Amino acid sequence: MRRQDKLKSIEQYGKMYVQKYLAEARKRHEAIVSDPLEALAFMYGKVFMRGRRDGVSIAFRNRTLAALQKYNTLQDIDPNGLEAYLHNRGVNNRHDRRMVRESISFITNDLQDYNCNVFNWAVEAIQRQKSAEAFAALVSIHAIGNKLATFYLRDVTLLEDIEDSIRGEDYGYFQPIDTWVEQVTRTLGITDEDDQSKISVIKDKIIRECLAAEVSPLLFNAGAWMVGANAYSLLLERL
């Protein structure tokens, strides 16, 4: 199979990712764009998933969201009391608690023009080709690094179907690189062993190969994760 055909096959798995992992967000889309707390919940579904078992990340995310249900609006949150409140509700990781405090502070102080809706802010930034600014704002929040910021921006774009707004040089802001994506790209010959620790090089090679093959770099990225993380279950589905 030609590499272009392989890239298109991975892109199809990216479409499967959208159908499977963004289905709930599609159902709740109206709430996400109208309710800042729902928008924050969508964001937390991405930025809690860092360097640990998914079950642990999901548990701390769910405890955080349950704790925030106490408040009617984000503006009602007392930042001085939030640390202890989250800890008492089982959010035991100090990095998570600081990320929550700083993300809410960013939203309530900097996104008032968006009614404190972090989803609508991201959508507008992408559509206005200000992805670099959005990325910089996200990574300025404690514990949100390159991978999580790009994960969030990628899924906002896929959910809204606004990839056409992305300029070629900005595609790197939508390419989360984790073990699965790196392994799939290396297996396909897009990258090699020397690229393993060079995230920017991996991103550039993925983007260049995808655009040359007329494949969505975002769907390829999501598809590469889908294949790597779910290879066993996907194999069973084909039996």
Image: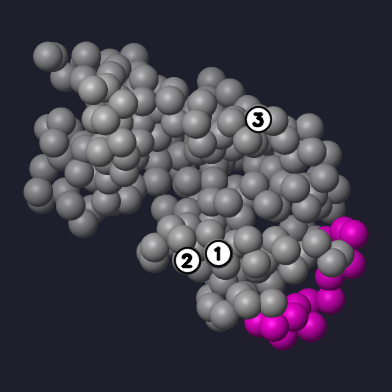
The amino acid type found where label 3 is placed reads Arg
Mark sitting on residue 59: 1
Q: Look at the image and tell me whether residue 218 can be seen.
A: no
- Neighbourhood count class around disc 1 (C-alpha, 10 Å): few under 14, some 14–19, many 20 upward: some
Q: Between marks 3 and 2, how big is the CA–CA gap?
A: 25 Å
In the image, residue 206 above or below residue 104: above
* Colour mapping: one colour
The amino acid type found where label 1 is placed reads Ala
Residue shown at the point (11%, 43%) measured from the top left: 192
Q: Position of residue 129 (x, y in %)?
A: 59, 33
Which SS class for mark 2? helix
- Residue picked out by circle 2: 56
Q: Look at the image and tell me whether residue 63 can be seen.
A: yes
In the image, residue 77 above or below residue 194: below
In the image, residue 71 above or below residue 84: above
Disc 1 vs disc 2: Cβ atoms closer than 8 Å? yes
Disc 1 vs disc 3: Cβ atoms closer than 8 Å? no
Between discs 3 and 2, the one toward the N terminus? 3
Between discs 1 and 3, the one toward the N terminus? 3
Q: Position of residue 233 (x, y in %)?
A: 31, 36
Which one is in front, 125 or 16?
Answer: 16
Q: Position of residue 168 (x, y in %)?
A: 42, 28
In the image: residue 5, left or right of residue 161: left
Residue shown at the point (79%, 83%) measured from the top left: 81
Mark sitting on residue 26: 3
Which span is picked out in magenta? Answer: 72-88
